[in-house]
Image (cartoon, grey):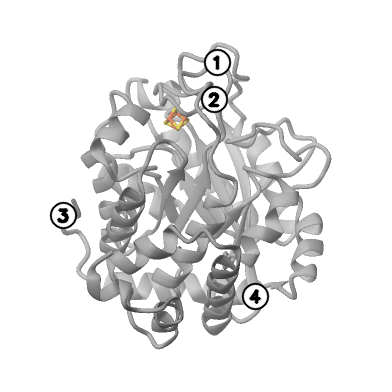
Amino acid sequence: MKPQDTALSLDTILSKPCRGQSLTAGQISFLLELSHPEQRAKLFRTARNLRHQYFGNEIFLYGFLYVSTYCRNDCTFCFFRRSNSTSPRYRKSIQQIVSAAVRLADAGVHLIDLTLGEDPALFDSPGDKFAHLVELVTAVSKATESVLMVSPGVMADHVLAQLGQAGTTWYACYQETHQRRLFDRLRPGQNFDTRLEAKVTAHRLGLLIEEGLLCGVGETTSDIVESMEVMRRLDADQIRVMNFVPQPQTPMAGHAPADPHKEMLIIAVMRLVFPDRLIPASLDVDGLSGLKSRLDAGANVVTSIVPPGRGLAGVARPDLDIDNGRRTTAAVQAVLKDCDLQPAGTAAYRAWTTRRRNMISGNGLGRKIA
Ligand code: SF4
């Protein structure tokens, strides 16, 4: 923190976003290191007030379908990494995914996220590699008329364009860290710049983008500040943080789990830095019992709602709360009610995405980010 920043009281820092002012890197860092419960409570209260200022008491709900758990990559933090022979592998058919997507849409989700690892069946196959993925997106879009997100790994420009034409609104591709050395440890053999540039391209093509970071993997406070700066330069429409969960049979199995409070702290600071953006509370880390604390920190999207009984996996905890029905819209709505929140109408979500798409198309995006 710079000397001039230390002179500011917490109250002064917290009042800045409410007056439409940006926080400095030093102030963001100061907030990320708050440890006193009363100070943290003040931060969370400010984050909730800002959420209310921009979104009222309405929350968006996202369904999650893990289409294929095969992956050609070997990320050290991931249960589904190529070399983990113990992780369950499946590849759902288009019919299976359409059926699960219809069920999610009928249950009232605002968006359906189609996620897959960099499945060798797509990435390493000869010919028109991604025709199957485009066909899947087309089929889900037609059957549900829902807003769609795809999270399929790093895509070439022309594939992103095809996915957009097929009905995708969102492209999610998490960097997880914006420190190159840490990136190389987390995602060995992958290219930092190519991954980042895919998001710039997606934005230029008119897709909304989600960027994410993983917390508790050896990053420093200044690394998190840097991640927020890159997210700002990307003009990401949705920004996500998730606490790292050590996965069995992976190189990071023995790594200490993340401080359970850190994710909430970062969510709250993200709300102050990006008050008008979408910030998820994921069910993937702590299940339904962890939802309230994430909403209390200022999140305005509930992600990873998964229909039970379909043999579908989550990511950070592959089977947590899925088959007991605790990752359904009904279960989530009960928690929202406890927090004096409610699901937004479908029209409100569509209006938000349309507004953002109109904004990015006028932004001249496509510049180099890092
Ligand atoms: S994080 Fe994604 S790209 Fe990396 S191994 Fe897991 S599924 Fe594959």
Where does label 2 land, which residue? Answer: 79
Judging depth in this view, the residue of 65 and 99 nearest the camera is 65
Query: Which residue is label 4 attached to?
Result: 58
Q: Is residue 192 visible?
A: yes
Towards the viewer: 232 or 36: 36
- Report whether the residue tagged 2 is closer than 8 Å to ligand 1: yes
Q: Residues within 10 Å of mark 1 (few under 14, many from 20)?
A: some
Along the horizontal axis of the image, is 304 left or right of 82?
right
Comparing labels 1 and 4, the label whose residue is closer to the camera: 1
| Residue under label 3 | 368
Vertical order, 229 against 101 (above or below): below
Cβ–Cβ below 8 Å for labels 2 and 1?
A: yes
Q: Residues within 10 Å of mark 4 (few under 14, many from 20)?
A: many
Q: Position of residue 152 (x, y in %)?
A: 44, 38
Pointers 3 and 4 in contact (CB under 8 A)? no
* Mark 3 or 2, closer to the camera: 2
Identify the mark nearer the N-term, 3 or 4: 4
Q: In terms of image quadrants, where is residue 264?
A: bottom right
Q: Secondary structure at mark 2?
A: loop
Residue closer to the observer: 253 or 189: 253
Count of picture labels: 4
Amino acid on which the number 3 mark rests in the picture: Lys
Percent from the top left, x then y, of residue 347?
61, 76
Q: Measure the C-alpha gap from mark 1 to mark 4.
A: 40 Å
Question: Farthest residue in the bottom direction?
Answer: 19
Q: Residue at x 60, y 63 (%)?
A: 37
Tell me the number on the disc at residue 249.
1
Residue 343 located left or right of residue 209: right
* In the foreground, 106 or 292: 292
User: Which of the two labelled residues, at mark 1 and mark 3, occupies the earlier sequence position?
Assistant: 1
